[in-house]
Image (cartoon, rainbow, N blue to C red):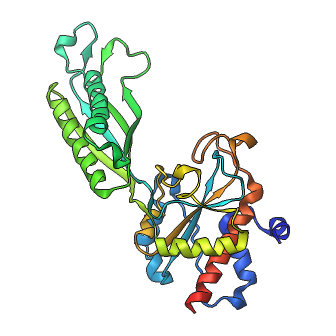
Amino acid sequence: MYARLRSRLPRSHAAGAAKLLKEQESCLQGKVWLFFQAGEEILDGAKEALDDGLLEKTHADAAMMIHILSGSPIPAGSICFPAQNGCYASADWYRIDVSGKGGHGAMPQNTISSVNTICAVNAGIQEIMSVGIEPAANAVMTVGELHAGFAGSGNIIPDSAYLAGTIRTFDEGVREKIKASLIQMADNTAAARGANAKVTFSHSAPIAWNDPQTRAFAFRSVQNLLGEQATLDLEQVLGGKFALISASEDFAYISQKIPSAILLLAAGTPAEGYTAPGHNPKTNFNEDVLYIGSACYAAVAMDRLKENH
């Protein structure tokens, strides 16, 4: 069966599922909606669709997503189930702008250094996480950008500087505490140096929720399709290392609205040359297993409609 599926399905999870479901349309005991989501990389697509009435238009009572998993030791073609309840971390993109007083590098006494200030703010970020948040909180705050001056301006103390990064947590209380601490720390650190700081938050996503009952149903359906060896509960295998995913997923907005199942399709191990994870400039994955994701989408949808009919 799998060989036939591989040869005739598009190399896309949802497109392949659409083909399978269309072929079985007369057997469907309800409606299945396929959501071709845009804007995943900036965490905006699902929220925009919800704001546009996605659930009101479809009247969907459950949802399911499959994400590619590459660069892990899990055999390609396996379907993996992350943790119950919160499984993908929330995300908040932040930027901190610092303004001081620029001037000539030979006369720093006449300036308020935005460089010194932004460096102190960066150090403060590390202190928030090391002493302000419990070690067991499963939270991380990182800095991915830091800018001051311009190429060739080593003799000039710039007026302004900024840094930007992300916050990830598995607890809404911890999430709000980190954001509040970040604002307070940036304000106080800048004020102590005579500068000003402004913290802004842009793209965000809540914690993605893997509904236990919907997850359990999908697990049984996939196991019936693929067998035990290719259906993995990540809470039970590999020491639970992959059960919680510190990356974020804007499907989380949907999972917060209706019961949802979140799955991963293993698509290549480091030993096979697939060393980089998803959303990485060097990522690559085994496209020959994508038909499995299509089959799982279709099977879970059909089984759920049959059970609820």
The percent coordinates of residue 50 (x first, y second) are 43, 71
Depth check, front residue: 160 or 130: 130
Name the quadrant of the N terminus.
Answer: bottom right
Relative to 255, say whether 62 is above or below.
below
Locate residue 64: give its quadrant: bottom right
Task: Please give left or right for residue 227 compared with residue 163 in the image.
Answer: right
Of all residues, the one furthest to the top in this rendering is 106
Left or right? Give the position of 168 relative to 117: right
User: Does residue 31 appear in the picture of this structure?
Assistant: no
Question: In x, y percent, where is residue 192?
Answer: 14, 27
6 displayed left or right of 104: right
90 relative position to 243: left or right: left
Q: Residue at x 16, y 34 (%)?
A: 188
Q: Residue at x 45, y 69 (%)?
A: 255
Residue 248, image x, y percentages: 46, 53
Task: Report x, y in % for residue 265.
Answer: 65, 59
